[in-house]
Image: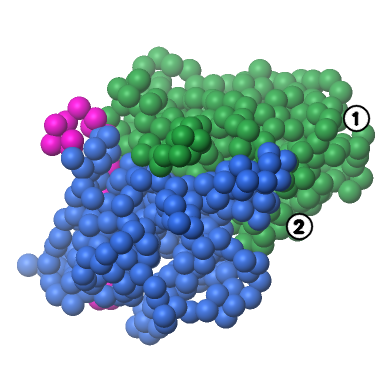
Amino acid sequence: MGTTKGALELAVDRWDCGEVPRDDILGAPGRTLALATGTLGPVLTLSAACASSAVAIGEALALIEDGLCDEAIVGGTDALHSFVYRGFHALKALSAAPAAPFDAGRSGLSLGEGAVVLVMEALEHAEGAGRAPIAIVEGFGSSTDGFDQLAPEPTGAGLVRACRRAMEHATVDAKAVDRYHAHGTATVQNDRMEAIAHAALFSGCAVPVCAVKGSIGHTLGAAGALDVAICALTLQRQVLPPVANLRQVDPMACVPAVVGVARSDRGSLALAVSAGFGGINAALLLRNPKVIQ
Amino acid sequence: MTVEPVLSSVAVWTCAGVWANAAPTGQGRGADLNSWSEAPSLSAIHPRARRPHALAVALVQLAHVLLTAREVATDAPSFKRQEVDLLLGTLTGSSAADFEFWSGIQKRGAAFGLPSTFVYTLPTAALAEIALALGVRGSLSTLTAGTISGIASIARSASRVSMSRARACICGGVEFARASDRRASNLFEQDTIALFLVEAGAASTHWPVVRDWQLGFAPEEPHRVSGTPPLSTLTALASAAVRLGTSSGIEHVFASSSDGHWARITLASSQHVDRQLEPD
C-alpha cells in the first residue's frame, strides 16, 4: 500500500485527548486490507510522498518478478484530513479555483481524497486462470532529485532519470511510447519541470499528454496508483482523456496536452509518472495487451 | 542473472551510543538518542541545509558516517553515491514532526501552521535530506511492516541488489518519536537509527553476504503474539554482520511483530561462501 499519512486521524484523535498514540498509523490501511483479504504474503506499506502508490506498484512488480508472489493487491490511500489541508495552506500551494494542469491561467493545486486498489499478477498466472489483463506493467523506474524538499529539479533531470530506468527495465525506447500520463499538479514549478522533461525524453516529438488532477484533485499518496488505474483503463479503451480545466497551454510549460474533448488513440504503450516532495520521482510503463505490435 | 548482495557498512545510533562498523553494546537508559559529542557538524556535510528537523539532522549525520566508512575501504569495488537507493523501515514515520505541526496549530490557530515543520510531516522528508546532503540519487522511500519494518527494508534491499534493480541501497530502521518534552508515539520505547549499506559485491571482500531473506504475514500464528523487540533485532543483525566480517560462519536473524509481520535474514561470512565455492 502506498500512503503519505496512513490513518493519521488515529494519531490526531489521541493527541486531542492528551494521549500518545500506540497505533501503527502508517501501516493501518495496508494491514486492514490484508486482514480483510486473508493474504499471507508480505504486507508492506511504502511511503514516497506523492509517488507513494506508484512506488508501491513498483514494489509489487518486484515481488512478482522475484517469484515471491503470484498475485499482489496493491494500491494507495490518503484521507483529506484538516491537518493536511492546513499544511498545504501554510505552503501557499492551494488554488482558489479548481486545478488546471498546464493551463496558462492556473494558480496552484486542488487537494483531493481517494483510495485505489489494483490486483497485479504474473501474466502466466492470469492466463492460466482465464483472466484477461487490463494492462501489462512493462517497467518501473524511480529516482531522487536531491535538489530541494519542496521544489522539483527545474531541468527535470530526476524525472527523466526515473523514466529512462523504467524504459530500460522494459527494454523499450522512448520512440515506442504513445502517451505520457503526467503528474500534472497544476503548480507552476511542477508543470514547467514536466514540460522540460517531456521534451528531453521524447526529443521534441508530440507524444500526447494526459493528466487527471484537474478532475479529481491531488490525492497525494493515492495519486500514483490512481493515475495508473485511469491510464490503464483509457489505454484499454483506446481513448485519450482531455486535461480538465485546461483551456490555453502555458507557453512556458508547452506540452502536447489533450485539450477540450477526448480523442481516440490506437497507441499501445503509456508512460505514467509521479513526482513528489523531496524530489522523489517514479515512472511506470503500461502496455495494452490487445494491441498487436 | 542474480547478484550476491553484501553488507558493506553498518552504523547504529541508540540511547546507548553510536557505532560504525562495530557491534553495538550496552542497553542504555531513556528513550532518546544518546548525545553524540563527536557527531559530524551538519554545516560541514550539508552546507545547503536550512534548519532541518532534528530527526533529519541525526539521520544525515549517521548516513554520512555510514557512507564514509564504506568509502575508506580501499580493497573494495568502486562506489558511486548517485547509484545508491534509500529504503528505510519505520513504524513511527514522521510522528514527531506531525505532533509538532499539530501542536503549533493548536497554539497559533488553524491558519497558522508552520510550513517549515509541515515539510517534515512526510516520512520521507528526512531521507530526502540525506539525498540533498550526501548526493544519493537512487530510489527513495520508507517501508512500514509493523515492528519488523527495519529488517523488512533490509530484505527488500537485498532483493533489489540481487536482481540488479539497484547497485546499492541504504536500508535499516529509523524510529524517532521525540517531540520536545513529549513523545508523539508510543510505538517504540526507544529512538533508534540503524543503517546498513547493502550492495552488489564480490565474495572475496571481507563483507558478509546476505544469503537469504524471507518476508510474510501470519496474523493467526500464536508464537507471534509477543513479537520481537525491533531494536534488539536490528542491533543483533548489526552485531552478526560485524562478527562475520572477521570470522567464518553463518547467522540467522528472525523478527516478528505482534500484528503478524515476520522476516528472516541469513548472513554468511565471505570465507564461508569462498569455501562453498571451492571445487571438491
Q: What stretch is highlighted in magenta?
A: B203-225
Classify residue A284 by image quadrant.
top right
Q: Residue A247 carries which label?
A: 1
Amino acid type, label 2 = Pro
Figure chain in blue: B
Q: Earlier in the sequence, mark 1 or mark 2?
A: 2
Figure chain in green: A
Amino acid type, label 1 = Arg
Horizontal and vertical percent position of residue B129: 56, 62
Q: Which of A215 and A87 is in front in this view?
A: A87
Can you say whether B269 is above or below B2 in the image? below
Horizontal and vertical percent position of residue A131: 43, 16
Q: How busy is the neighbourhood of tag 2: few (under 14 within 10 Å), some, or many (20 plus)? A: some
- Say whether mark 2 and mark 1 are on the same chain: yes
Q: Which mark is residue B212?
A: none
Report in which chain the residue with disc 2 lies: A
Q: Which mark is residue A154?
A: 2
Residue drawn at the location 90% of the way across and 30% of the way down: A247
The secondary structure type at the circle numbered 2 is: loop
Q: Which of B162 and B114 is in front in this view?
A: B114
Looking at the image, residue A287 sits to the left or right of residue A58; the answer is right
Can you say whether B19 is above or below A286 in the image? below
